[in-house]
Image: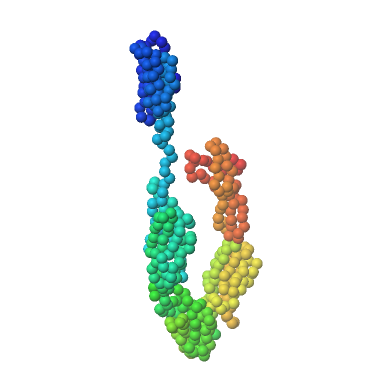
Amino acid sequence: MKITVIPGTLSRALVALTLVAPLMVAVGCSSGSSAGDRTDSGAQAGAGGGTAGAAGTDGAAGNVAGMDGGMDGGAAGSAGGGGAPAAATLTSIAVTPAAPSIMVGGTQAFVAVGTYSDGTTQTITTTASWTSVTTATATISAAGLATGVAPGTTVITAMSGGVSGSVALTVTAPATLVSIAVTPATPTIASGTTQQFVATGTYSDTSTKDVSASVTWASATLTAATISAGGLATGVGAGTSVVSATSGTVVGSTTLTVTTAALVSIAVTPATPSIAKGTKQQFVAIGTFKEPTTNVMTTQDLSATATWASATPATATITTSGLATGVAVGTSAITATRGTVVGTATLTVTTATLVSIAVTPALPSIAKGTKQQFTVTGTYSDTTTQDLTATATWTSATAATATVSNAAGS
């Protein structure tokens, strides 16, 4: 800092300087004292600021030098009183979920969130140290994944730098099977036909589950019906049989009636469906049976046991379970056969239909005033694709931001 005082214009010069550090004032006199006094006053004023100013040869020079010294000292003092702020420290850890419960063999992922002295938070799941107080109840991995070992309760803790957070984890015994329901409840089938049964288990926690594949199936009267390991019963002769599903000591059952009714017709539904090329249609075959002695008519789903065929495979194909697929435009007779009885439906296959549109590029960014060419590709029911850029109708949701043209090449 430089201050100039022109001789003869002032009888006394007073200069004051205020800094961020404590106030420092340097004063020099141009008259009323000896040169030595003026020099001392400048030097002393500079020293009062923290760093002594160089002594001048007269009062004015000493005065300015003192101000410079005071300025330098004040600045140094200001710098010395500052410094980098202290780093935030971890003050607490929250572990979530708060009070989880899992079954033996089940797992639970925990998350640890640290709160710091400056009020910020941070997920520290992967850096915290995880422990389970009772490892005989549950163990926990370094990543915070707990596994239930035995029924009971344990405390799960996440620790980092001496700070910890904990939650209680409850491990319960697996739910036990309490009952089995066999469906359909009391079906009737003709001799030589089949019936698929389903076993549904109900557990101690009120949950239910299809246990058809794990139970043991049995037919009490094999002269009336047999049953496979998967629960598919076959009528052998007129009569009834108790069909049971067993798991451990839990048993569920129903009664199957087998008649000598003869299959008289098969209805294939839907009767005249139309599908687009490349799409599918599920057909169902319902057989009508007639009891010879009573003339009672009954019906049964034969979809799984009938023989399915498509008269024109070039137009449509069909699986053994009655699922047809359109191959080319045209029609084809779909048949379901059981013995000498045949049921028929007519399937029409139309041209492929548009099922989706993809616009590219997906997320472009352009400068104001510039242009972006988009392309639209359509995917059809037969999985073919086609460029629809010229035929699609283009719109911009926010015309104030960007416009789009429907004219080719614009």
Residue 380 place in picture, x, y as percent: 59, 57
Give the percent coordinates (x, y) of residue 173.
Answer: 41, 73
* Residue at the (52%, 84%) spot, across then down: 227
Q: Is residue 291 visible?
A: no
Q: Where is 23 relative to 158, above or below? A: above
At horizontal 38% and vertical 53% (from top left) the residue drawn is 92
Q: Position of residue 55 (x, y in %)?
A: 43, 19
Horizontal and vertical percent position of residue 110:
44, 60
Q: Is residue 205 visible?
A: yes
The quarter holding residue 27 reads top left
Return the residue found at the far right: 314
Q: Is 240 positioned to the left or the right of 343 in the image?
A: left
* Rendered image quadrant of residue 249: bottom left
Rendered image quadrant of residue 166? bottom left
Q: Nearer the viewer, residue 299 or 331?
A: 299
Front-most of residues 215 and 115: 115
Q: Which residue appears farthest toward the top when viewing the image?
A: 8
Q: Nearer the viewer, residue 364 or 59?
A: 59
Image position of 336 (left or right of 245): right
Q: Residue at x 60, y 59 (%)?
A: 383
Above/below status of 17 relative to 350: above
